[in-house]
Amino acid sequence: MKKLKELILDLNASDIIVICFGLFLSALNLIFYSRIPNWYLNIIINFAFSGFILSLGYMHYTTKKVFWEQFHYWYIVPTILFSFKEVGYMIKYIHLGKDYDHVFISIDRFIFGTDPTHLLYNFANPVLTEILQVAYTSFYFLPVILGANLIINKNIKGLTYTTFIIVYGFYLSYLGYFLWPGIGPRFTLHNFGNTSLELPGLFITDFLREFVNSGEGIPAGTLNPAQVVQRDVFPSGHTQMTLLSMYLAYKFNAGSKKFIIPAGVLLIIGTVYLRYHYFIDLVGGALFMVLTLITGHYIYNKWAAIRKSEPFNWRSFK
């Protein structure tokens, strides 16, 4: 059996960042153990998952089987979702219900003189709502589409880099949620229960809206949804991660950019039109996107140097 050091060096940069974020969450659970119910279960799960990642890296690089290789690429998708739920659970108890929506509202009003969601409501119509709701929901698929495109093109180096940047970007946005929790204008500036009446779609808007709501912990019939919804407003992760997907699709000249870029533009517009975000959240998402690219590139190549593997260089794709 390999020694622990050798097992760790088998891991790629995405594995390392997942483990490090799990350790970070475990540390927060320890610090705020008096506030977080069942905090020890979070720690046990985080450490168990780190062991799973070590085992997965071992299977990938020792068996060389396609199954373990592909599993090693795609286990990240459910991992991001699980971390999102754990973060939401922790924020609720760490901040004890303190949100920063009033700050975001004040900034938006300073910039526009009013609330952007009210401005955009003047242009609302069912066709536009349907298009933007479909685009908004595509957020969950854009990075996957890009990754699949890179696999089809056998651009494994690009896939590995993209996977790291995406997972690292998600984790940075989660740090923003920890620092500045908020619930968004659909709760604070509008009546959440009237959303479907005020912004009706055509055919699938209600279904997609319910899909999004369920992912944030507020399925239909939830009592006091504003109290239980995930605090994930600033920065706008939808804006940050969509901009990253658009940028990477463009830089790798992926065929999927013809879909990702226009869908991404509509998605970002939809974040405010559909009342999920304040305008300042989009600004935060753009800044976090730049932060992700700058620091992520450095971290990725730093780990490559430790592993004595090839660093990533955009010039090799010119």
Image (spheres, helix red, strand yellow):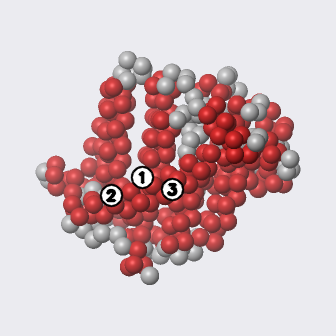
| Residue positioned 57% across, 64% down in the render | 246
124 versus 107 height, above or below:
below
Residue under numbered circle 3? 289
Secondary structure under tag 1 reads: helix
Mark 3–mark 1 Cα distance, whole angstroms, equals 10 Å
| Residue positioned 49% across, 25% down in the render | 95
Image coordinates for residue 236, horizontal then vertical, percent: 58, 47
Tell me how many marks there are: 3
Image coordinates for residue 229, horizontal then vertical, percent: 60, 31
Q: Which mark is residue 168?
A: 1
Residue contact between numbered discs 1 and 2, judged by CB atoms under 8 Å? yes
Looking at the rendered image, the quarter that the C terminus falls into is: bottom left
Residue under numbered circle 2? 299
Q: Earlier in the sequence, mark 3 or mark 2?
A: 3
Mark 3–mark 2 Cα distance, whole angstroms, equals 15 Å
| Mark 2: few/some/many CA within 10 Å (<14, 14-19, 20+) | some
Whether residue 205 sits left or right of residue 252 in the image: it is right
